[in-house]
DNA sequence: ATGCATCGCGCG
DNA sequence: AAAGCGCGCGATGCAT
């Protein structure tokens, strides 16, 4: 099989660019034009093909026998499949590899080159002196310059791949899968339903905003909306900014004081409704993005960013985050399986709570998971000192749920109290600070292994600062330089980890992050849980099309033949424990339908 | 015009 | 000693 490294150079201008448009909008636009392409076959010399030669050069390649290497393969791969109609056998992306090996650091080609070849000044991306912005027809001189930059980029990409190809095979396969979700879409949109929904949402919001008689600029600005409230004789609530510590208006949808204000002044309902209409436009912008993304016969590419989080979790990209669609919302129902196929959706139940119990060695909790007990009710029973069950005690169970989901990573009494009152996951519950403190204490004393784990993992991370400790093992984790090695060959990286006056800090996205036991524990648990789900995705992708993942959820398209058997197979697969945690009790649940819904 | 920090809000 | 965490997008407000 040939290894082809490739880089497209395409027309762009001020309006028509990837900062303004999504990849789907850009490539499907009338203005889309390939200036040329640089192609390197195996270790041969990179060749430039100009505008008139590109198509022949692309079509001459035996794509079913090609492993493709690009830097940001979602872009070049999408052009190959959607513009030229050719599908490589395997997709490799050096930007994705960079994020896997160096999460939280820039994955631009320029920065990758420095990281891959720190001591070789010849391996540097040149400054792009040519300004080709807005030039539709390149003159020979400009084309010459672009061609030379392009060849240089292809050569760098190839060299970086050679340097980093020792990346675990399973992770390479995940990068390939991520590219296929985008370049070879598995999902479709229900265009009619989506169009109707978009118009309806838009008209509804407009009616409410216009009806209020307030300028939408005022409605959408916190500052200006606060001033407006003053003018009509109301005192806008304030709160302390969690980042700057300054007093800021508390006018968010979930700000308690603002909610109370709305309840207190029902005569201003038109104002509250208009504020919501202006602030909650996610569904409208998203519907619009879906419609333009699915330009090609309603096929919907799924843009996922491999290793977006330093824990390995995927993220959204390309102005379209498929991982935060409102639950039970119309948007999800507008996403469908193609033809007569069905969409299978399954998620790993309480995966993080299970992983936490397992790593902390909390035998009692593990036994409860193994027995299929309702963990939230079980903990609530301890708190309330009486048997709690889902049907009779929904409020008490919600307290148990909030505790299990939050307190495992060190949440304190004040935050627990606020979280309960906000009622984000259930009915709002109002506790005094001392009642909240009691629950926190009960949690920490009931599951002693968990606060113990916070201390152990903080100590383990500190060990990464001294090379005497490299190789030390804790469960599935191994100590190395500034990182905790994971059982899949990857690592939880803490770039430039060091002590500061604030404590333990590290660099992420040019920001200094402060960390501590509870937070490290959360990172470790998230990283380990992510391995369980991606292991399953890799197995399932052999038989079905994995179309999307949302952290603990896998979305698969498959035929409508024996759907119950397919569903069972998926669930069974997701519950296979990894070799490094063969005794972890896993559980999964799911369903299938034509649409994406649960 | 464009970049950056901050906030709000959607998901896990 | 104590501290829930992980994302991306869109809008605002301010700096360049």
Image (tube, coloured by chain):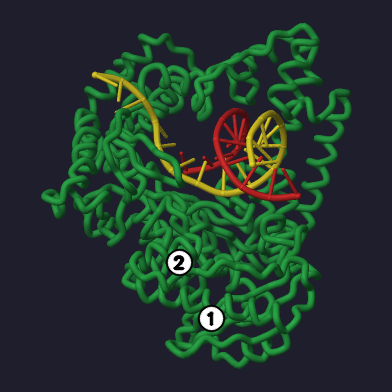
Chain colours: A green, B red, C yellow
Q: Point out the image quarter for the N terminus of chain A.
A: bottom left
In the rendered image, residue A154, in percent from the top left (x then y), is placed at 51, 77
Q: Can residue A282 be seen in the rendering of this structure? A: yes
- First reached walking from the N terminus: tag 2 or tag 1: 1
In the rendered image, residue A419, in percent from the top left (x then y), is placed at 47, 23
Secondary structure found at label 2: helix
Out of A559 and A134, give the one closest to the viewer: A134
Q: Quadrant of residue A439?
A: top left
The residue depicted at 56 percent of the width and 88 percent of the height is A47
Q: Can residue A589 be seen in the rendering of this structure? A: no
Q: Is the residue marked by circle 1 packed among few (<14), some (14-19), or many (20+) residues within 10 Å? A: some
In the rendered image, residue A272, in percent from the top left (x then y), is placed at 75, 21
Q: Quadrant of residue A338?
A: bottom right
The residue depicted at 23 percent of the width and 39 percent of the height is A457
Q: Is residue A239 above or below residue A215?
A: above
* Left or right side of A484 for C7: right
Which residue was labeled with disc 2? Answer: A175
Q: How many marks?
A: 2
Out of A492 and A44, give the one closest to the viewer: A44
The residue lying furthest to the left in this view is A468
Q: What's the chain of the residue with tag 1?
A: A
The residue depicted at 66 percent of the width and 51 percent of the height is A333
Q: What's the chain of the residue with tag 2?
A: A
């Amino acid at each position: 099989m040939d290894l082809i490294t490739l880089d497209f150079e395409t027309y762009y201008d001020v309006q028509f660019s990837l900062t303004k448009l999504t990849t789907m909008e850009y490539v499907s636009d009338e203005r889309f034009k390939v200036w040329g392409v640089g192609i390197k076959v195996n270790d041969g010399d990179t060749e430039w093909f100009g505008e008139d030669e590109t198509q022949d050069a692309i079509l001459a390649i035996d794509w079913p026998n090609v492993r493709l290497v690009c830097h940001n393969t979602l872009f070049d791969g999408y052009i190959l499949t959607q513009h030229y109609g050719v599908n490589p056998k395997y997709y490799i992306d050096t930007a994705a590899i960079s994020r896997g090996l160096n999460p939280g650091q820039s994955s631009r080609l320029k920065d990758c080159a420095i990281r891959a070849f720190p001591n070789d000044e010849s391996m540097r991306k040149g400054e792009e002196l040519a300004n080709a912005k807005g030039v539709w027809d390149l003159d020979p001189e400009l084309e010459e310059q672009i061609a030379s930059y392009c060849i240089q980029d292809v050569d760098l990409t190839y060299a970086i791949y050679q340097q980093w190809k020792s990346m675990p095979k399973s992770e390479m396969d995940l990068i390939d899968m991520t590219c296929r979700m985008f370049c070879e879409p598995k999902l479709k949109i229900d265009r009619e339903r989506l169009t109707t929904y978009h118009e309806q949402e838009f008209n509804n919001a407009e009616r409410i905003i216009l009806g209020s008689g307030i300028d939408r600029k005022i409605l959408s600005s916190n500052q200006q909306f606060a001033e407006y409230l003053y003018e009509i004789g109301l005192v806008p609530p304030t709160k302390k900014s969690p980042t700057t510590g300054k007093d800021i208006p508390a006018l968010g949808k979930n700000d308690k004081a603002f909610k109370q204000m709305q309840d207190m002044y029902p005569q201003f309902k038109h104002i509250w409704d208009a504020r919501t209409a202006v602030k909650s436009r996610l569904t409208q912008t998203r519907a619009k993005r879906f419609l333009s993304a699915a330009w090609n016969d309603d096929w919907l590419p799924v843009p996922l960013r491999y290793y977006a989080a330093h824990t390995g979790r995927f993220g959204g990209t390309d102005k379209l985050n498929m991982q935060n669609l409102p639950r039970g919302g119309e948007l999800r129902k507008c996403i469908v399986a193609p033809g007569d196929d069905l969409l299978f959706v399954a998620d790993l139940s309480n995966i993080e709570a299970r992983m936490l119990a397992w790593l902390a060695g909390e035998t009692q909790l593990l036994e409860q998971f193994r027995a299929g007990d309702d963990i939230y009710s079980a903990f609530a029973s301890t708190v309330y000192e009486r048997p709690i069950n889902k049907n009779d005690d929904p409020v008490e169970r919600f307290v148990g749920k909030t505790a299990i989901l939050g307190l495992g990573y060190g949440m304190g009494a004040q935050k627990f109290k606020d979280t309960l009152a906000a009622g984000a996951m259930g009915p709002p519950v109002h506790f005094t600070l001392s009642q909240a403190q009691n629950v926190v204490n009960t949690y920490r004393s009931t599951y002693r292994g968990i606060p113990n784990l916070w201390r152990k993992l903080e100590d383990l991370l500190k060990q990464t600062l001294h090379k005497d400790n490299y190789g030390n093992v804790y469960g599935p984790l191994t100590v190395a330089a500034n990182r905790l090695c994971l059982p899949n060959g990857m690592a939880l990286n803490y770039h430039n980890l060091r002590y500061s006056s604030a404590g333990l800090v590290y660099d992420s996205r040019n920001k200094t992050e402060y960390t501590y036991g509870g937070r490290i524990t959360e990172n470790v648990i998230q990283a380990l849980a992510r391995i369980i789900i991606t292991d399953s995705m890799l197995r399932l992708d052999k038989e079905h099309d994995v179309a999307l993942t949302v952290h603990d959820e896998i979305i698969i398209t498959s035929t409508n033949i024996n759907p119950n058997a397919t569903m069972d197979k998926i669930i069974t697969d997701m519950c296979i424990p990894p070799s490094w945690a063969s005794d972890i009790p896993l559980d999964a649940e799911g369903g299938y339908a034509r649409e994406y819904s649960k």
